[in-house]
Image (spheres, rainbow, N blue to C red):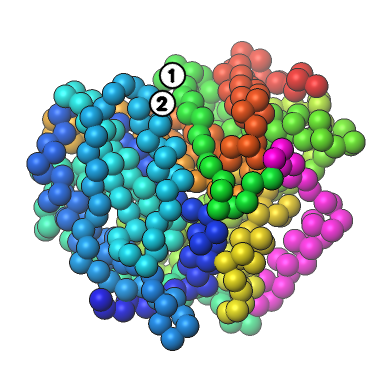
Amino acid sequence: MRKLRLLGNIERGCWLIDQTAPMNVLAVAQVRGRVALARLSVALELVQRRHPLLRVCVQVEDGLPAYFYSDAPIPLAVMERRDDTHWQEVVTAERNRPFCSDQAPLLRLTVLHAEEESELIFTMHHLISDGASSTFILRDLLLALSGQASASSLPPLPERQALEDLMPQSERGLSGLKRSAHFLAEQAWTFFVRRPLLLAEQQSVPPLERRSAVSHQQLTKEETSSLLSVCRSHGVTLHGALCAALLIAVGAEVRTESAATDNLLGCCTPVNLRRVLQPQIGEDIGLYVGPIVTFHRLTAHTELFALATELTKQLHAARTAGVPARALATQSRLLPSWVSPQQAAKHLYNRLFGTVSVTNMGVLDIPLEYGDLRLTAVHIGGANNPYGSLISIGVTTLAGQLFLNFNYNEQIVSDERIQRVVSATMRAIRSSSTHPQIRDSSV
């Protein structure tokens, strides 16, 4: 195998944490029409040739982890599709099945096949993929599968440097160190003075024994249109409203564990960094996201759109200030060379990470038609295994319809708790257009 390059610190941190609990990213493409199974292997080969990181594994050389190229093909499993919920069962199994990172590739595909409807389930190591990466992969595969793409129309993309070497100039050198120092001071103030809360773990489960699960939800096109309309009327983003609904639902759970009626909760928003990197990254796959974590005081009387307004303003200000890149650059600087997988995992999820997380892919800018195939839904989500009591949502919008996947760890978050949180969140989302000031009435 040929050595590509050493892992950057962000990649190394992900590689270390994955050794304690799977860090898988999943994407499901639901398609109507007959999938040509005989063409799948050739289509996968074309996609693998296009994206360099679909040919790598991680091996340690001279004590340092590095990417190495391999000619191993992408693993493919084809199963007979049972019914409309079969894919959810497979997704649960896949999110908990770890990769052997020293064996390439770090992607596998499962196809649930029926005559007129199929699901393509992509499981990727977070080391080489984020949410946007998964949409590029599934789109490229559908183009190749339908015959709409060839080696000339999907040429190989360049090998990329580590994320640290692509950071904006403001995050490098002495100026970057100063920005990191200021960021750390703000983080320390939040941690020690403001003291945000996490959901308590209802049952302690060792990282290697955790089982990540998902609750799939969706809105109709009419509900999605109505929600977008009411968000515009309040001057908030859809993302702000979704975060607010989840925070209010989880806030009710936190109050059952806290003596206080006024609690500070954090919301993590992963942000695509491709446009701010230097040079800008196009449709390359990789881990190109940075976090914005906003903090909000919640009571039993917190109103949905008041909170959504606060979220929208804070997120806009943080984006303008370059917080996602700064947070990632700071995390990279703080990862020592000697850290163990257990130490890296221990510091990943803390009160500064956020009580909840919402990854909103927005309106997916990919075709719906692929020859005889039509893309009807895309679901994206990540395994929560390393994140303890975190409840997160992966959100996509396709053809005017909103799809939401609630991610959590079983037992750490009980079945009863996740049912309450999902129900309260979806109730707030659905009723917001007719009741614009939603209050938490569950306590």
Helix, strand, or loop for circle 2?
strand
Distance (Cα) linking label 2 and label 1: 6 Å
The numbered disc on residue 401 is: 2
- Callout 2: few (<14), some (14-19), or many (20+) C-alpha neighbours within 10 Å? some
Position of 347 with respect to 118 (left or right) is right
Magenta span of residues: 177-203
Residue 126, quarter of picture: bottom left
Residue 23 at what x, y percent from top left? 48, 53
Among all residues in the image, which is located at the extreme top?
A: 434
Among all residues in the image, which is located at the extreme bottom?
A: 62
Question: Which secondary structure type mostly characterizes the magenta part of the structure?
Answer: helix
Residue at image position (9%, 41%) is 38
Residue 6 at what x, y percent from top left? 41, 78
Residue 120 at what x, y percent from top left? 28, 38
Answer yes or no: do the residues labelled 2 and 1 have beta carbons within 8 Å? Answer: yes
- Residue 200, magenta (yes or no): yes
Helix, strand, or loop for circle 1?
loop
The numbered disc on residue 183 is: none
| Mark 2 residue type | Gln
Lower sequence index among marks 2 and 1: 1
Closer to the camera, 337 or 150?
337
Quadrant in the picture for the C terminus: top right
| Mark 1 residue type | Thr
Residue at image position (79%, 56%) is 190
Residue indicated by mark 1: 220
Residue 345 at what x, y percent from top left? 61, 60
Q: Is residue 363 above or below residue 167?
A: above
Residue 288, quarter of picture: bottom left
Q: Report if residue 34 is visible in the image.
A: yes
Among all residues in the image, which is located at the extreme right?
A: 259
Closer to the camera, 147 or 182?
147
Q: Report if residue 130 is visible in the image.
A: no
